[in-house]
Image: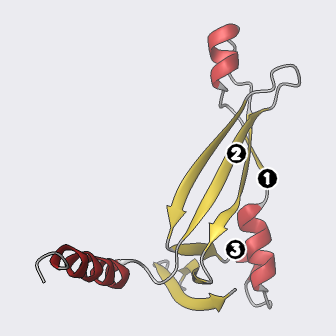
Amino acid sequence: FFELFPLFRCADVVRVEAKLRAPCFGLTATELRCCQKNCGFKKVRYDTFGVISLAIPKIFMGMPVTIEALLRKYFCMEVIRGATCDRCKSQTGKRDSGLFKKQGLSKVSTEVFMKFVYSFVEKKKNGIYTQATFEFFIRVMI
């Protein structure tokens, strides 16, 4: 019996960890590339996530919006002006070379939680501003 005790204890630990772990999790990959053609610097960072938070832009106010459109906006490439890559900074001392930032899913569990956030500020007739934020979650099976 005592020889099996560590095995039972290990199984208990695995069960507890499974209960504590988020029901869905994944890994995002964020790639930063230098905007200078002759540089070629690229850096990839991996981050874990439990929920993908998608902001609903004001341009969709009063219009239907699809999850696909929000995901495309979330994962679209963007230019970070005023940033400098490590290579340009160390080799040439150049500042403001700019960086391309692209984000994507690297690893995803079989289900993902998505958080949708919509915020707006409204000015009332008496000049007072009110702010409201709506949040809701959905579970997507992959």
Secondary structure beneath dot 2 equals: strand
Q: To which residue does mark 1 refer?
A: 77
Image coords of residue 93 (percent x, y): 65, 9
The residue under label 3 is: 57
19 or 85, which is in the foreground?
A: 19
Q: Report x, y in % for residue 18.
A: 37, 81
User: Is residue 6 visible in this depiction of the protein?
Assistant: yes
Q: Residue type at mark 2?
A: Glu
Give the residue at x 58% y 91%. Answer: 138
Q: Quadrant of residue 10?
A: bottom left
Q: Distance between the Cα atoms at labels 2 and 1?
A: 10 Å
The residue at which mark 2 appears reads as: 31
Direction from residue 6 to residue 78 in the image, left or right: right
Looking at the image, is 45 positioned above or below residue 120?
above
Question: What's the CA distance linking mark 2 and mark 3?
Answer: 24 Å
User: The disc labelled 1 sits on which kind of residue?
Assistant: Met
Circles 2 and 3: CB distance less than 8 Å?
no
User: Given this view, does label 3 or label 1 mark the residue nearer the observer?
Assistant: 1
